[in-house]
Image (spheres, rainbow, N blue to C red):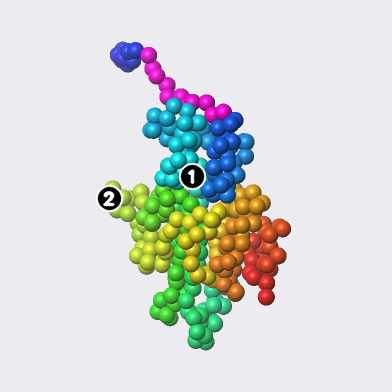
Amino acid sequence: MRPRPRELSGPVTLLESPPLSDREFAGFQRLLYREAGIWLSPAKKALVVGRLSRRLRELKSPSFGAYLRQVEADGTERVRLIDALCTHETHFFREPRHFDFLARELLPRWRAQGDTGRGEARRVRVWSAGCSTGEEPFSLAMVLRHHLPVSEGWEIDILATDLSTRILEQARQARFPVDKAQEIPTPYLRAYMLRGVGAQDAWMKAGAELRELVRFQRVNLNDGLGVVGRFDLVFCRNVLIYFDQASRARAVERLLGHLSPSGLLFLGHSESLVGLGARLRLVIPTVYGPRP
């Protein structure tokens, strides 16, 4: 007979979260809306408990109310709270029709215009707003570098921004689980991504040719500070769905303020500019350009 496992001696203590009252939840609602323009519906109460409980234990905070008071007084902790409550789901080449449009229509046209030698036609600026862990800006870098080669003098500048400092630090590493390789078209994967070896064989990394195209910066779309200049392409996909109508309107105005006269704004498939897009024309579904 196998020996029975030794029983634990003494009582087992379970780490339980303190209760989150409706009043405390309303305080987190107001704070996140004020700071980030994101509105938490009452259905998100369990999410708040799940994502903040660990931090309360780390700080030995006795209640959500005590933690809320600390966050209101401490700007650094406020950033951590926003990091914890924001969702960061993303993929390489997410919403493929956008990348098909770039590869088949837009970039060949730009390349032809660049061949005419028009002024700054060989410089492209792109803003990936809400870049999360970096899959979107590096997908853009692959497509742009492939179709606008450096050998022809094309300069590419991709600004990747997010609200979360923690997620931006991860994105800067340009390091991804190798399982994500299946999301990348084979020609791009072979040309631009590096497979880890030995202890790193479960990871892949964007090559130096891509990394030099992308720069990362924390930007809060709710205040719009920190972004300079205009962009030929602005990707803000699956970000506006977290805003209410007023916050969405403010964010769209800020995005448009940085869009060049001939630039294009890309939104997610579940987003629209109904009631907000008077200054824009539809190019293809979820892609907009300024009205002439």
Regarding residue 193, the answer to whether it shows in the image is: no
When the figure is inspected, residue 222 is found, relative to residue 60, above or below; the finding is: below
The residue that label 1 is drawn on is 82
Residue 202 appears in the picture as rendered = yes
Q: Position of residue 48 (x, y in %)?
A: 53, 36
Image coords of residue 268 (percent x, y): 60, 56
Q: Is residue 180 left or right of residue 268?
A: left
Q: Nearer the viewer, residue 287 or 142?
A: 287
| Labels 2 and 1: the sequence-earlier one | 1
Q: Nearer the viewer, residue 80 or 132?
A: 80
Above or below: residue 274 compared with residue 43: below
Q: Quadrant of residue 259?
A: bottom right
Q: Is residue 234 left or right of residue 190?
A: right
Give the alpha-carbon distance from disc 2 to disc 1, as whole Å: 36 Å
Does residue 40 lie above or below 168 as drawn?
above
Tell me the residue at 37%/14% (across/down).
11
Q: Which mark is residue 198?
A: 2
Based on the picture, tell me whether residue 20 belongs to the magenta stretch. yes
Is 46 magenta? The answer is no
Residue interval drawn in magenta:
11-21
Q: Where is the C terminus found, in terms of image quarters?
A: bottom right
Q: Amino acid at mark 2?
A: Gly
